[in-house]
Image: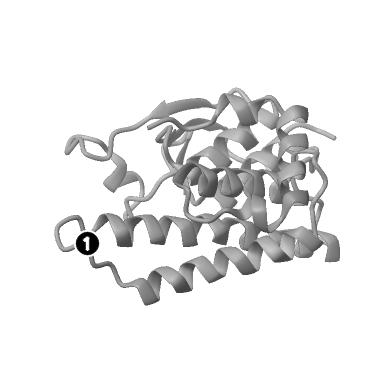
Amino acid sequence: MTKNPFALTAPKALRTSGKSPFGRMARMANMALGSKVAWEDMDRLNPADPLPQQNPLRKIPCMILDDGSAIHDSTIIMQYLDAYDGRNMLLPAPSPEAFAMLTDAIIAKGITEAAFNMVYEIRNHPEDGQPNMEYVDAQREKIIGSVAYFGKNMPATDANLVSIKLAASLGYVRFRAQHDWESQSPKLGQWLQEFADKNPFYGETIPTE
């Protein structure tokens, strides 16, 4: 297929943090496609950082295009990179299969969102040590339900929109130790190992404290 069949503006830089699970999703997609988009490790604590001008929500990842405009959100960035690449490697052309994959991708991303919410609810109560456990448990139930779903609906281990998001999300929950999903679904643990073995960029993007 022709490179950049939709005449999209070329991606210039992928701005994120090495610790961001959402940024990791975009980085893995970039590497899976063999794209040459540079990765900028940004510092959100730096008041001089231009992120507020690039994304009014001040969220990462944020991809800057050659014309200075920006694309936000890991899912949209991954779709943009795939469309620019032109091979439909991460997501098929619009079809029932594509929309089913998009739905699964959002479920996979939701695992990270739930774990992220748990981490910050607990982290925001360092003094009294009394996070809202009802809220924390509700987030954990989202993870448990999603792990159960993917235990029955495992994607292929080839790199695509769903598998990349799921791998990043499972890795993040393991990293933050918010739920022992590997005991809940050993088959999903095997799936992640097979994904990591097949796709070296998984190991290359593992976050560190």
Mark 1 crowd level (few <14, some 14–19, many ≥20, 10 Å Cα): few
Looking at the picture, does residue 209 appear above or below residue 116? above
Q: Is residue 24 left or right of residue 208?
A: right
Q: Which residue is drawn at the image coordinates 20% and 35% (left, top)?
A: 46
Residue sitting nearer the eye, 145 or 68: 145
Tell me the residue that label 1 is attached to.
129
Residue sitting nearer the eye, 78 or 178: 178
Looking at the picture, does residue 85 appear above or below residue 70? above
Residue sitting nearer the eye, 110 or 179: 179
Looking at the picture, does residue 103 appear above or below residue 161? below
Q: Which residue is drawn at the image coordinates 80% and 60% (left, top)?
A: 153
Q: Position of residue 22 (x, y in %)?
A: 50, 46
Q: What is the three-letter code of the residue carrying label 1?
A: Gly
Q: Is residue 128 left or right of residue 86?
A: left
Residue sitting nearer the eye, 161 or 134: 134
Q: Secondary structure at mark 1?
A: loop
Judge whether residue 86 can be spotted in this image. no
Q: Which residue is drawn at the image coordinates 37% and 55% (left, top)?
A: 119
Q: Quadrant of residue 159?
A: top right
Judge whether residue 195 can be spotted in this image. yes
Q: Which residue is drawn at the image coordinates 60% and 48% (left, top)?
A: 170
Q: Position of residue 31 (x, y in %)?
A: 64, 28
Q: Is residue 22 left or right of residue 45?
A: right
User: Which quarter of the image is occupied by the C terminus?
Assistant: top left
